[in-house]
Image: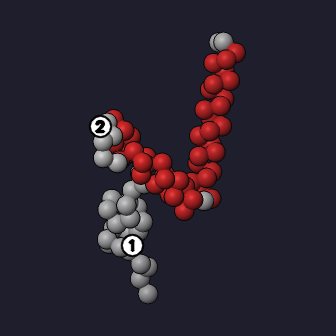
Amino acid sequence: MALWLQYVIVALVVLLALWMFLRRQFPAAVRRARIALAAPLVRDGRPPWMRRLARVLAPVQAGRGGTCGGCDGCGPEPPPR
């Protein structure tokens, strides 16, 4: 295997691990960053592919298909007393 391909694969693995760490340790900052990246892409006059990319980047709204565990009754049941 070519040496440059090995470097690319290692870089992708490191970036994936960093993304998972950031999502786990700093969820609010990751959410704000995703919103900041997606907001300019949904403006009027943007091509359809940019709007689709923004929908992929934007975080899921709480209570609408998210796994927040509370506001729409989809979360776990409280333990019986």
> What residue sits 34% from the left and 48% below the top?
43
> What residue sits 33% from the left and 40% below the top?
46
Q: Residue 14's quadrant in the figure?
A: top right
Q: Which mark is residue 33?
A: none
**Circle 2 SS class:** helix
Q: CA distance from mark 1 to mark 2?
A: 34 Å
Tell me how many marks there are. 2
- Does residue 52 appear in the picture of this structure? no
Above or below: residue 2 compared with residue 61: above
Give the side of residue 2 with respect to residue 76, left or right: right
* Residue tagged 1: 70
List x then y, in percent, for residue 22: 61, 52
The outermost residue toward the front is: 45
List x then y, in percent, for residue 45: 30, 42
> What residue sits 65% from the left and 12% below the top?
1
Indicate the amino acid at tag 1: Gly
> What residue sits 43% from the left and 79% below the top?
79
Indicate the amino acid at tag 2: Pro
The outermost residue toward the bottom is: 81
Classify 10 Å Cα crowding around label 1: few (below 14), some (14-19), many (20 and above): few
* Residue tagged 2: 48
Above or below: residue 28 compared with residue 38: below
**Quadrant of the rendering where the C terminus is positioned:** bottom left
List x then y, in percent, for residue 47: 31, 36
**Who comes first in sequence, dot 1 or dot 2?**
2
List x then y, in percent, for residue 62: 38, 64
**Circle 1 SS class:** loop
- Does residue 10 appear in the picture of this structure? yes
